[in-house]
């Protein structure tokens, strides 16, 4: 189990760094983009979909590194370690980036999103009342983001730990691979 945790932590470092890059670098583009779809779909792809695909791929790499077979419990342990390390890196890096490196980046991104949403809704023929409602919601989100504290970051991290454990169980179900019975008998593993 120790090797599994260690290998999971190493892959978690790689995954965490990848998430940081896929979250921060595209943000510079999204801040100035004039396309509603680029901002909404692009951020979902770079911040969620690609890291999810890489995490699944890393789960299979992790299984191979520990011999190609693992039980559900071993899979959950290794994958959860990987996701936990990745989330610590991405959360800490995101907090440092938003508070110290580019403190206005999130607000700029959200203001650009708001402007593109207004334009998209107007082009779609949405009524002024619905647009005003949507803008009020976005204004609340911008205000909440501007007033976020380290405690808010810790609360989000705590929620992510639960999500990471659920994802680890799902990935474990996908990647679980028990050693065939005839190999156990030959290796005197059944007693």
Image (spheres, rainbow, N blue to C red):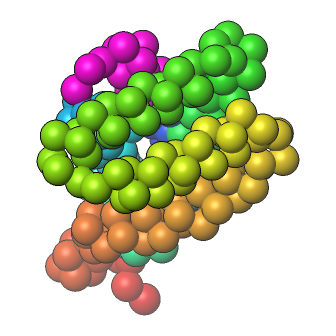
- Quadrant including the C terminus: bottom left
Residue drawn where x is 57% and y is 33% of the image: 90
Left or right, residue 130 beside residue 124: right
Judging depth in this view, the residue of 17 and 44 nearest the camera is: 44
Res. 42 in view: no
Within the magenta stretch, is there residue 86? Answer: no
Residue 25, horizontal then vertical, whole percent: 41, 16
Within the magenta stretch, is there residue 34? Answer: yes
Residue 4, horizontal then vertical, whole percent: 50, 51
- Quadrant including the N terminus: bottom right
Residue drawn where x is 68% and y is 51% of the image: 157
Q: Quadrant of residue 44?
A: top left
Judging depth in this view, the residue of 52 and 6 nearest the camera is: 52
Residue range in magenta is 22-35
Determine whether 91 is above or below 107 in the image. below
Q: Quadrant of residue 50?
A: top left
Judging depth in this view, the residue of 80 and 39 nearest the camera is: 39
Residue drawn where x is 48% and y is 70% of the image: 166
Res. 143 in view: yes
Left or right, residue 152 beside residue 17: right
């Amino acid at each position: 189990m120790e090797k599994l945790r260690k290998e999971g932590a190493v892959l978690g470092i790689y995954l965490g760094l990848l998430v940081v890059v896929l979250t921060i670098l595209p943000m510079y583009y999204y801040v100035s983009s004039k396309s509603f779809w680029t901002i909404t779909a692009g951020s979902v792809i770079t911040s969620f979909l690609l890291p999810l695909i890489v995490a699944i791929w890393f789960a299979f790499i992790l299984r191979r590194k520990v011999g190609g077979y693992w039980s559900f419990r071993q899979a959950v342990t290794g994958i959860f370690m990987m996701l936990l390390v990745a989330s610590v890196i991405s959360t800490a890096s995101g907090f440092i980036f938003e508070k110290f490196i580019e403190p206005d980046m999130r607000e700029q991104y959200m203001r650009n999103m708001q402007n593109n949403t207004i334009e998209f809704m107007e082009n779609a023929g949405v009524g002024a009342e619905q647009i005003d409602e949507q803008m009020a919601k976005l204004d609340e989100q911008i205000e909440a983001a501007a007033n976020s504290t380290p405690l808010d970051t810790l609360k989000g991290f705590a929620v992510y730990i639960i999500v990471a454990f659920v994802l680890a169980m799902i990935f474990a179900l996908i990647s679980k691979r028990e050693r065939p019975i005839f190999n156990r008998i030959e290796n005197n593993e059944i007693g």
